[in-house]
Image: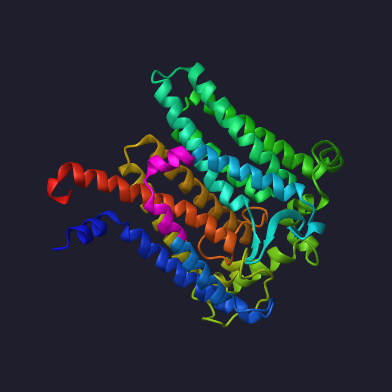
């Protein structure tokens, strides 16, 4: 028997690969149908297939290196991410290097298309926070409220700079992703509930207050915090979309109509009747709901549950704290993306422009997810290498 091939088969995460292949099938079929609306030129099915090839290449390269390498690269990658975020905000669109679109300056213009650096920064940030937490616990093995406050201060200091740069674009959706990642890692890091409960309670109060001020004190928020009118419009159109049917509520109304018209079993592949803008990117779930109905949409949600379950099971297998925190951060990132994207299409949450992971069309999103998934592959692959070489001398 080929021992090397045997080791690879045992170490490689085949279940994760099968799950991702199912997402590929869903993505290409949904995009193929969305493309028939004629909103944009070009063949997005072929482009998304190419994105998946790039995804596989990036994930494979990332898997090749062991977790110790990523510990060394955590802060340098975080620094590179900050430089990219600064550049995308500082370089004016008139230079032809950056792109201003949909009310935000968030993209670089490159020969291969527009690139959104925040998608890469999400993974770089997870690496940095995971390294920070693991090193803190190595230094302070006896936990106290004082050491937990010190850890929390380090995490907030690491978060505040990229968060501020993202808000300058402005990109509210990505800002919320960073906050969700941070909250999850604070909990997983074992910070005492004596700190977490007041902290999270305070954040909830601040969030509720901002929502109230968005409804009744718009001028104050514009002058004090620099909020833009279109951001308030998203709140109004979320609460009462039919009062803004010809403007900011249009996307939500068409999405609700499409999903609702699919009923239980859907209208069938490429049998859509409701026009939904951006239906190959942010609103691709509306295409799924209309064509495949409640059954098909539920199946896609179950596929995400299967992915999260598998990632969680993998995380529980890992003994290295750094690897555990990295996987926990990736789980939080993917979960929030799914919750926010699907939630905004069914009026559960405001529209923020967050793509549906592994299904929505988009090169930057796919490459950012490739980095994250590649890390999971790496940690599972090299962790199992360690297990088998230590327990089975014949495999060495």
Foreground pick, 48 / 386:
386
Which colour style is shown?
rainbow
Foreground pick, 191 / 218:
191
- Inspect the magenta stretch and tell me whether residue 61 lies in it: yes
Q: Is residue 189 above or below residue 61?
A: above
> Percent from the top left, x then y, of residue 392?
14, 46
Prevailing secondary structure class for the magenta stretch in the rendered image: helix
> Does residue 257 appear left or right of residue 325 in this picture?
right
- Corner quadrant of residue 363: bottom right
Q: Quadrant of the N terminus?
A: bottom left
> Percent from the top left, x then y, of residue 118?
62, 50
Q: Is residue 100 above or below residue 121?
A: below
> Does residue 204 appear left or right of residue 68 in this picture?
right
> Percent from the top left, x then y, of residue 132?
49, 31
- Inspect the magenta stretch and tell me whether residue 233 lies in it: no
Name the residue: 17% across, 58% down.
Answer: 3
Name the residue: 13% across, 45% down.
Answer: 393
- Corner quadrant of residue 197: top right
Q: Which residues are magenta?
A: 58-73
- Corner quadrant of residue 149: top right
> Percent from the top left, x then y, of residue 4?
21, 58
> Does residue 169 appear left or right of residue 328 in this picture?
right
Q: Is residue 136 above or below residue 393?
A: above
Number of numbered discs on residues: 0
């Amino acid at each position: 028997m080929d021992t090397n091939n045997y080791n690879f088969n045992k170490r490689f995460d085949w279940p994760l690969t099968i799950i991702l292949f199912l997402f590929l099938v869903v993505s290409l079929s949904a995009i193929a149908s969305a493309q028939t609306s004629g909103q944009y030129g070009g063949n997005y099915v072929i482009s998304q297939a190419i994105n998946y090839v790039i995804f596989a290449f990036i994930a494979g390269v990332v898997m090749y290196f062991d977790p110790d390498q990523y510990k060394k690269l955590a802060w340098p990658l975080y620094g590179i991410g900050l430089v990219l975020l600064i550049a995308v905000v500082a370089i004016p669109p008139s230079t032809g290097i950056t792109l201003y679109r949909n009310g935000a300056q968030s993209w670089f213009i490159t020969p291969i298309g527009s690139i959104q650096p925040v998608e890469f920064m999400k993974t770089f940030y997870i690496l940095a926070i995971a390294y920070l937490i693991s090193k803190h616990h190595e230094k302070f093995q006896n936990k106290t409220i004082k050491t937990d406050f010190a850890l929390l201060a380090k995490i907030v200091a690491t978060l505040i700079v990229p968060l501020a740069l993202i808000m300058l674009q402005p990109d509210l959706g990505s800002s919320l992703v960073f906050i969700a990642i941070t909250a999850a890692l604070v909990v997983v890091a074992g910070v005492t509930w004596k700190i977490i409960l007041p902290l999270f309670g305070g954040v909830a109060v601040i969030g509720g207050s901002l929502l109230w001020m968005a409804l009744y004190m718009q001028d104050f928020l514009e002058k004090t915090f620099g909020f833009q009118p279109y951001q308030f419009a998203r709140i109004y159109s979320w609460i009462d979309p039919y009062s803004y049917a010809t403007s900011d509520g249009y996307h939500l109304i068409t999405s609700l109509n499409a999903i609702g018209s699919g009923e239980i079993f859907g209208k069938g592949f490429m049998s859509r009747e409701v026009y939904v803008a951006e239906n190959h990117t942010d609103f691709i779930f509306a295409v799924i709901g209309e064509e495949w109905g409640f059954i098909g949409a539920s199946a896609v949600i179950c596929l995400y549950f299967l992915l999260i379950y598998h990632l969680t099971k993998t995380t529980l297998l890992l003994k290295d704290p750094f690897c555990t925190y990295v996987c926990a951060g990736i789980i939080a990132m993917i979960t929030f993306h799914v919750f926010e994207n699907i939630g905004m299409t069914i009026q559960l949450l405001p529209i923020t422009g967050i793509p549906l992971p592994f299904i929505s069309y988009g090169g930057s999103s796919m490459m950012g997810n490739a980095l994250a998934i590649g890390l999971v592959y790496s940690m599972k692959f090299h962790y199992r290498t360690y297990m088998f070489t230590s327990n089975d001398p014949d495999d060495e």
